[in-house]
């Protein structure tokens, strides 16, 4: 009997051990399981008092909309939020993980978390997985050094920008930003512009849809405006409602069978 | 274009050296809108050879006959071939000397048939075309792609323009735009394309066609803004980052 040596993948980084088997399976015609993607529009912009993040709320599984109202703006720290595009599991897991790491760091240092801390933790994790963790993120927050907005790509590169868009609807949203953004926007102008950009993604991109979520982060305060805009209401609702009165369906025949009940002695269930 | 590889009839596949497999010198997006008096069309003047910007004075919008404007993106040599074919078409029409002239609807249909037939022979003309015109007070604006997909609308764009310019146009286009408003709207779209399309250059032509006739503007450039404070020192909060 051969003793199978269990290969423990090296700590950190992607283990490529199963790639040859997967290729062989693909050639044999095995369909890989489809994953839930957030074909998405996510945006962020810096305004005069802080950062505003925006996202649509549609999650897709291939051509099907699997969640009409999902949450794409994830909590990282009281002063830092992160929008995620790409594979939903990846964005959830990676933002959850870094959020916990940030909290432990806050306990250790006794200070408010900084946005670049979250940035470095996210980018080093994504880089070590060489792009296989398919998470494209827009990270924004306000810390002691001021307001910051960053984009993080699945392979681990980052950008620091005054306004950013990611996801399949990013071109439509970027068209809105490039034509209308200026420095020093007020809070209301900023929210309006973010909503316009997300709506451009919702109405011009098939992977984005449903509602607009907005998150406004300023020094010492954040407002999570879930479903700030609902531009896709249900238009046709039957005013009469649905009622199925007895007699609506024609009964063709009736047969009643009585249950045979048998009493049996038994022990009580073990606690 | 004739096949000498086999003596069969119309169903012959051309040998590879005689059909377009990939484009070489390409033009990027064209954007066009209907406005109060007619059609406005804008395109930049770049001809890229792969990732090199080889030609910087390519006119990608041309008048066709008296009533139409043709803008094209994609392979420039195929655009020149299309212009040659349309020249012949207009010439033969003029030779009738019957006081009637081919309008935008007719030219659009001709282009449509031409593109679709070439696609069926697996030898496409590698272009996305925009045809706009005015005849007898009726405005006409349509687009034909290299596989023959065609439709008409109040605003059309090719290539990247579909992703970057059409969301803006869907939001801000109105039926009764004046000439100045129309040009401003087109310039807004072209500026976004200049910022975000790598093959776009800052040298544009805007063409206008109305019942009176065609005007193609002189080449000009748009003002760009790069002064965002986040661009001045992006790593201010994180020394050593990028």
Image (cartoon, coloured by chain):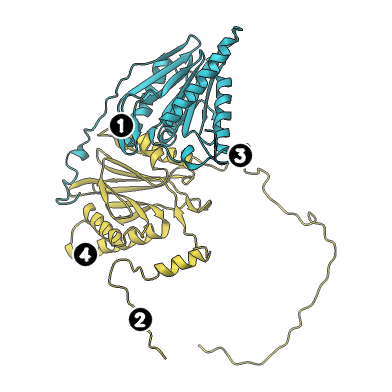
- Give the x, y percent position of residue A187: 31, 37
Please give the residue where the numbered disc 1 appears in the rendered image.
B54
The hue of chain B in the figure is cyan
Circle on res. B7: 3
> Can residue A145 be seen from the camera position used here?
yes
Q: Residue at x 48, y 28 (%)?
A: B129
Name the subunit of mark 2: A
**For the residues marked 1 and 2, what is the alpha-carbon distance in whole angstroms?**
57 Å
- Give the x, y percent position of residue A137: 33, 51
Please give the residue where the numbered disc 4 appears in the rendered image.
A107
**For the residues marked 4 and 3, what is the alpha-carbon distance in whole angstroms?**
83 Å
Q: Tell me if B44 is positioned left or right of B91 in this view.
A: left
**For the residues marked 4 and 2, what is the alpha-carbon distance in whole angstroms?**
37 Å
- The image quarter in which residue A122 lies: bottom left
Name the subunit of mark 4: A
**For the residues marked 3 and 2, what is the alpha-carbon distance in whole angstroms?**
65 Å
Q: Residues within 10 Å of mark 2 (few under 14, many from 20)?
A: few
- Give the x, y percent position of residue A203: 48, 39
Q: Residue at x 42, y 22 (%)?
A: B61
Please give the residue where the numbered disc 2 appears in the rendered image.
A6
Name the subunit of mark 1: B
SS at circle 4: helix
- Give the x, y percent position of residue A89: 41, 60
Colour yellow, chain? A
């Amino acid at each position: 009997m051969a003793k199978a040596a269990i290969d423990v993948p090296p700590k950190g980084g992607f283990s490529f051990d199963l790639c040859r088997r997967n290729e062989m399976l693909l050639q044999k015609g095995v369909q890989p399981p489809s994953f839930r993607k957030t074909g998405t529009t996510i945006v962020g912009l810096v305004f005069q008092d802080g950062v505003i993040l925006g996202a649509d709320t549609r999650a897709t599984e291939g051509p099907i909309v699997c969640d009409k109202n999902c949450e794409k703006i994830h909590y990282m720290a009281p002063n830092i939020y992160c929008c995620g595009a790409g594979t939903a599991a990846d964005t959830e897991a990676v933002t959850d993980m870094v959020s916990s790491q940030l909290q432990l760091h806050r306990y250790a240092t006794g200070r408010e978390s900084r946005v670049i801390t979250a940035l470095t933790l996210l980018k080093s994790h994504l880089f070590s997985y060489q792009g296989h963790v398919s998470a494209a993120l827009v990270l924004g927050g306000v810390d002691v050094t001021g307001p910051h907005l960053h984009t993080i790509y699945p392979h681990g590169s980052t950008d620091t920008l005054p306004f950013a868009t990611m996801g399949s609807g990013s071109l439509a949203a970027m068209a809105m930003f490039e034509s209308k953004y200026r420095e020093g926007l007020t809070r209301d102008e900023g929210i309006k512009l973010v909503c316009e950009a997300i709506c451009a993604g919702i109405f011009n991109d098939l992977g984005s849809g449903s509602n607009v979520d907005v998150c406004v982060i300023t020094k010492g305060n954040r407002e999570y405006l879930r479903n700030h805009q609902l531009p896709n209401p249900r238009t046709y609702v039957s005013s009469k409602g649905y009622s199925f009165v007895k007699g609506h369906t024609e009964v063709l025949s009736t047969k009643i069978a009585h249950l045979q009940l048998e009493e049996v002695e038994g022990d009580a269930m073990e606690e | 274009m004739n096949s000498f590889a086999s003596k069969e009839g119309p169903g012959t596949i051309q040998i590879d050296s005689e059909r377009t497999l990939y484009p070489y010198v390409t033009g990027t997006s064209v954007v066009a809108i209907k406005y109060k008096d007619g059609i406005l069309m804008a395109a930049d003047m770049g001809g890229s050879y792969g990732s090199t910007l080889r030609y910087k004075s390519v006119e990608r919008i041309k008048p066709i006959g008296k009533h139409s404007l043709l803008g094209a993106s994609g392979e420039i040599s195929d655009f020149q071939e299309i212009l040659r074919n349309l020249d012949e078409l207009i010439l033969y029409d003029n030779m009738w000397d019957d006081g009637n002239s081919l309008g935008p609807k007719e030219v659009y249909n001709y282009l449509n048939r031409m593109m679709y037939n070439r696609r069926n022979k697996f030898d496409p003309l590698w272009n996305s075309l925009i045809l706009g015109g005015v005849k007898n007070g009726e405005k006409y604006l349509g687009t034909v792609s290299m596989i023959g997909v065609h439709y008409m609308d109040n605003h059309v764009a090719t290539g990247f323009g579909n992703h970057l310019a059409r969301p803006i146009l869907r939001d801000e286009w109105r039926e009764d735009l004046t000439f100045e408003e129309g040009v401003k709207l087109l310039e807004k779209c072209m500026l976004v394309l200049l910022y975000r399309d790598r093959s776009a250059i800052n040298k544009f032509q805007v063409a206008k066609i109305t019942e009176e006739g065609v005007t193609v503007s002189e080449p000009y450039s748009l003002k760009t803004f790069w002064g965002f404070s986040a661009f001045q020192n992006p790593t201010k909060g994180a020394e050593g980052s990028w």
